Each structure stands twice: as C-alpha cells, then as structure tokens.
Image (spheres, helix red, strand yellow):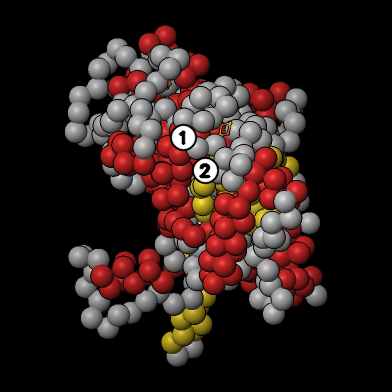
C-alpha cells in the first residue's frame, strides 16, 4: 500500500510525508493513545506500529521502512531507567548512535530518523514531536526510495532494448 | 559416450580471486575436468562470446558467474549466459551481494570518474579525457562498455538459481557444488550452497565467547595484538562472525584475524550490516549519549566495516543522491 501511495503522491502538489512510528507498548504507545483519548490534535502523518519495547526495534525494520517508501521513521521508548525490560531502551540508544551515522552515509538526512523518550503520561509530547518531525520532513520533501530504485534500474533497460534489436535483426 | 555436462565460468566486476579459487581445487580439479566440459572461461581458455552464442538455449548445464555487475558489457554477457544455461550460480560475495566493488555505491558515478581520471595523485590527464562509450575515426565506429551508476548483485540483473558465498568461496564448497550438479538432484531454487548457521558455530574459539559481552572500547587489528586463544570479538575487535554464514572453516580466525563477513548473512537476515551493527552496539557499556559516542569512536567507518561485502544487496542498495 505504501508503495502505491508513494507513486501517486511524490512530486505531486498534495504530497504528505509518511512517518513510520515504532512506539513502545508500555510508554509511548500508551501516550499516543492518551493523546487520542484527550483529543489532542497532531498531524495525521504517523503510522504507528506497536512494539513491546524500543529495544525490539531492529535497525532492519527502519531500513525496510525507508526502502518501502517511508519519508521518516520515529522510534519512541520509555525514559532512561524506566524500560519495562530494564535495558531495552539503552540498547536502542546505543544502536541508534551508530545507526544514524550509517543512515546518513546512505544519503538520508538525519531529520528523517528520530528517537524520543516519551512516557505514558506525556500525551502532549507525542503531539509536539510528531508535529515537529512532520514539519522537518515536509521541508526536506519526499524520500521516495521505491521510485528511486526503479529510476536507478532504468540504466539496465538500454542494453536490453539493444539486444532485442540485434536479435530481431539476426532473425529477420 | 554421451557428452560431458557443459559448464561455463565468467567474471564481471571482480578481482580474480574467484578464478583463483578454482585453481585452489588442486588435484581435485582433475576430477572436475574428468566429469565436466568447461566450454567458456575467459581467464583461462581462449573461447569467445560467439562460441557461447552457438549453443542452444539451456544447453549449458551451469554457468558460474563471479563479480558484481556494473557495466553494459557485463549485463550483456550475463544475459547471454542466462539464456544458454540451465542453472546460474552466483559465485562469490560480489555476485551474491555486491562485494568490495559495491562499496562504489557510496559514491556517485561522476565522483568516481572525476577522482580516477582527474584528481587521483597518479592521474596525468591535462585534457581531462574521460572514457567514451562510442568511438569514431574515419571509417570505423566502435562501441565500448559503459560504466553504470549503480553496482548490482547478479540477481538484480538476471534470474539466479544458486549462490556460492565467500570472498572467494572455499574449494570445499566449490567441490560440493560440483558434486551436487553432477548428481542431478538439485536443491530448491534460491539455495545458498553453504550451511545456514552463523560462523561462530564452526569457530574454534566458540567456547571462549561469553554470553554477555560489554564493550568499553573498540580496537583495530592494525593497532593492537590479538590474543590467539580467545574469541576475537570479546577482545573488543569487530568480528562479523555472529552475523555471517559459516562454510569457510573460520579461515580468518585461524589466521588470528577477525571475520569481516564475506560469506554474507544466514537466511534469516535481510541486511547483514544492520544486523551485526545492532548486535554489537547493543552491548556497548555506556548509558548516556556521551559515554556511548566515546566508545563508538573506535568504529570510524561503520559502512565500510558492516557493509564491506553487502552494500549492493542491502536494503538501501546505494547512497541516495539529491
Ligand atoms: S565472534 Fe568471531 S572470534 Fe568470536 S566465536 Fe564468533 S567468529 Fe569466533
Ligand atoms: S572468516 Fe569471515 S571474512 Fe574470513 S573467510 Fe570466513 S566468512 Fe570470510
Ligand atoms: S519497555 Fe519501553 S523502552 Fe523498553
């Protein structure tokens, strides 16, 4: 679904950034829920995926999100010291410190990837963070990796056509 | 006597190490030659493209193709071999995942050409001449291969049946692969012809690898001595063994050097670089950004370290250019 939407939206006037948000069940997800119940309005661009702990967010999930068309990825976990599984958010932070350098090396702007600690009671922080991230990603424009992948692959078709042409010439 | 099965061997963007690994078969090469006909092998035998074109479709039993794909000529050749072969084997890390040549995906083609033809200390090219894909003089017109923008794995260009991992594949794996081909009982398509276990499983230092690691610094093998008995990762050197497929016999560890990951990931891993980065950095001892960053200074080039062989086949494939 992400893929198709991206095709039709990127580059067009009505483009809206798509943010994939991995939220920890015990804190940030609950905070987002609270924000919803309290009718706190935030930008509708975040697709929330609930995980049991920010430590469960494998960097492969983040790369996969970008590769499938996300314009930004947000990870939300419990504040340091508050992780339900003691060490999960520290593991997440340690990976993040190096992983963000890797993502930048792949040409993806650092504002497209964000880690935030948001406790269950901080419904308003969910709003602030999402709104701020959406504004920043909007300023950057679409990432559209699926589209880029198919653009890159166009250099392959040139030779394909030539080979087909030659074969026709041989068979004619 | 019926004809022996026909085998082709071809190289694309590669260093020649994969070709070398065939020679490493030593006396076993005689067994191979007794049982198959090598009908195309540019590095060793004088056959031409036109010789391959003469074969009927799928007449070649198997083509072993090494190297990444990064030029129009390589694409043309692998498409031809695909058409003529029953089985295509991506031979070695570059064909499987991009290998060392795929590190070029960290740059744009223009940056590479500019450096090589203008800026490199060894470049003497006052007219800033660049290679051209077409060449014309009075009565001749020649077309030359053109470099691609993106380095690709073999499977990103043609349909691949099997993978033989490694930089280069060990002669043991090659011999087993030949035996499998000769047996006629082929594994299911897409199989990587090496054990689906992490390298640590066959590492002689496995028993010295602690279950809980806690890194206070990262060391580099050119700066520090490696204890020849203990798990190399536990000594603070980056060893990609935990995220690498076994099959090499832990060759680098036997030579007292850390694994750099050339056998690629096991089947459960999509992106070897992200996986090993995740597993190693999770075990850094720090808890604040400052403490963590100080330890991470020991990994100055994470892409070159974790994507050394897998950039083209990774989830992001290449540096995005805006
Ligand atoms: S981490 Fe490296 S040295 Fe340690 S057991 Fe695994 S392969 Fe062997
Ligand atoms: S130890 Fe690692 S880098 Fe060395 S040959 Fe084996 S898989 Fe490749
Ligand atoms: S449980 Fe929330 S970050 Fe671990």
User: Which residue appears farthest toward the front when viewing the image?
Assistant: A38
Q: Which mark is residue A117?
A: 2
Q: Mark 1 points at which residue?
A: A80
Estimate the x, y position of residue B196 in percent, counting from the top left: 60, 24
Ligand 3: does it lie within 8 Å of the C-beta at label 1?
A: no
Lateral position of residue B225 relative to residue B52, left or right? left
Estimate the x, y position of residue A41 in percent, counting from the top left: 69, 60
Q: Which residue is drawn at 53% across and 66% down?
A: A136
The reply to whether discs 2 and 1 touch (Cβ–Cβ < 8 Å) is: yes
Q: In this view, does B93 lie above or below A9?
A: above
Q: Earlier in the sequence, mark 2 or mark 1?
A: 1
Q: Is mark 1 on a helix, strand or loop?
A: loop
Check the picture and name the quadrant holding the N terminus of chain A. bottom right
- Residue A133 seen from this side: yes
Q: Is residue B251 above or below residue A120?
A: above
Q: Which chain letter matches label 1?
A: A
Lateral position of residue B98 relative to residue B254, left or right? right
Estimate the x, y position of residue A169 in percent, counting from the top left: 74, 75
Both marks 2 and 1 on one chain: yes
Q: Which residue is drawn at 25% across and 17% down?
A: B227
- CA distance for labels 2 and 1: 8 Å
Check the picture and name the quadrant holding the C terminus of chain A. bottom right
Q: Nearer the viewer, residue B227 or A84?
A: A84
Mark 2, Cα crowd under 10 Å, few <14 / some 14-19 / many 20+, is many
The quarter of the rendering in which ligand 1 is drawn is: top left
Q: Which chain letter matches label 2?
A: A
Q: Nearer the viewer, residue B116 or B227?
A: B227
């Amino acid at each position: 679904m992400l893929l198709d939407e991206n095709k039709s939206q990127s580059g067009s006037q009505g483009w809206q950034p798509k943010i994939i948000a991995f939220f920890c069940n015990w804190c940030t997800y609950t905070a987002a829920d609270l924000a919803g119940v309290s009718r706190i309005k935030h930008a509708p661009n975040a697709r929330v995926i609930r995980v049991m702990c920010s430590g469960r967010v494998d960097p492969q999930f983040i790369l996969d999100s970008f590769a499938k068309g996300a314009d930004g990825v947000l990870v939300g976990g419990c504040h340091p010291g508050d992780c339900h599984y003691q060490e999960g958010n520290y593991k997440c932070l340690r990976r993040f410190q190096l992983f963000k350098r890797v993502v930048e090396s792949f040409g993806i702007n650092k504002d497209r990837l964000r880690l935030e600690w948001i406790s269950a009671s901080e419904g308003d922080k969910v709003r602030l963070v999402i709104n701020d991230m959406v504004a920043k990603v909007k300023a950057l424009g679409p990432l559209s990796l699926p589209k880029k992948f198919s653009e890159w692959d166009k250099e392959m078709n040139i030779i394909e056509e030539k080979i087909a042409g030659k074969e026709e010439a041989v068979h004619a | 006597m019926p004809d022996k099965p026909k085998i082709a061997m071809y190289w694309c963007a590669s260093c020649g190490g994969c070709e070398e690994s065939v020679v490493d078969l030593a006396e076993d090469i005689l067994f191979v030659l007794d049982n198959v006909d090598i009908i195309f092998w540019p590095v060793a035998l004088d056959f031409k493209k036109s010789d391959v074109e003469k074969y009927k479709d799928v007449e070649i039993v198997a083509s072993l193709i090494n190297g990444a794909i990064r030029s129009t000529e390589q694409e043309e050749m692998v498409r031809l071999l695909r058409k003529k072969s029953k089985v295509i084997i991506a031979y070695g890390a570059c064909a499987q995942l991009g290998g060392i040549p795929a590190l070029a995906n960290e740059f744009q083609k223009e940056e590479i050409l500019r450096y090589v033809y203008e800026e490199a200390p060894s470049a003497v090219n006052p007219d800033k001449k660049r290679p051209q894909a077409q060449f014309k003089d009075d009565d001749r017109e020649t077309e030359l291969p053109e470099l691609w923008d993106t380095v690709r794995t073999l499977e990103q260009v043609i349909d691949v049946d099997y993978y033989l991992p490694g930089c280069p594949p060990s002669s043991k794996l090659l011999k087993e692969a030949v035996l499998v081909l000769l047996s006629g009982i082929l594994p299911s398509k897409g199989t990587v012809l090496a054990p689906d276990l992490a390298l640590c499983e066959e590492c002689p230092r496995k028993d010295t690898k602690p279950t809980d690691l806690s890194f206070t610094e990262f060391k580099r093998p050119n700066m520090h001595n490696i204890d020849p008995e203990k798990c190399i990762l536990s000594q603070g050197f980056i060893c990609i063994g935990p995220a690498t497929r076994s099959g090499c016999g832990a060759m680098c560890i036997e030579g007292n050097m850390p694994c750099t990951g050339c056998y690629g990931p096991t089947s459960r891993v999509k992106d070897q670089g992200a996986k090993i980065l995740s597993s190693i950095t999770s075990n850094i001892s720090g808890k604040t950004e400052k403490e963590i960053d100080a330890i991470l200074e020991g990994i100055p080039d994470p892409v070159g370290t974790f994507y050394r062989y897998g950039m083209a086949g990774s989830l992001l494939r290449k540096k995005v250019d805006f």
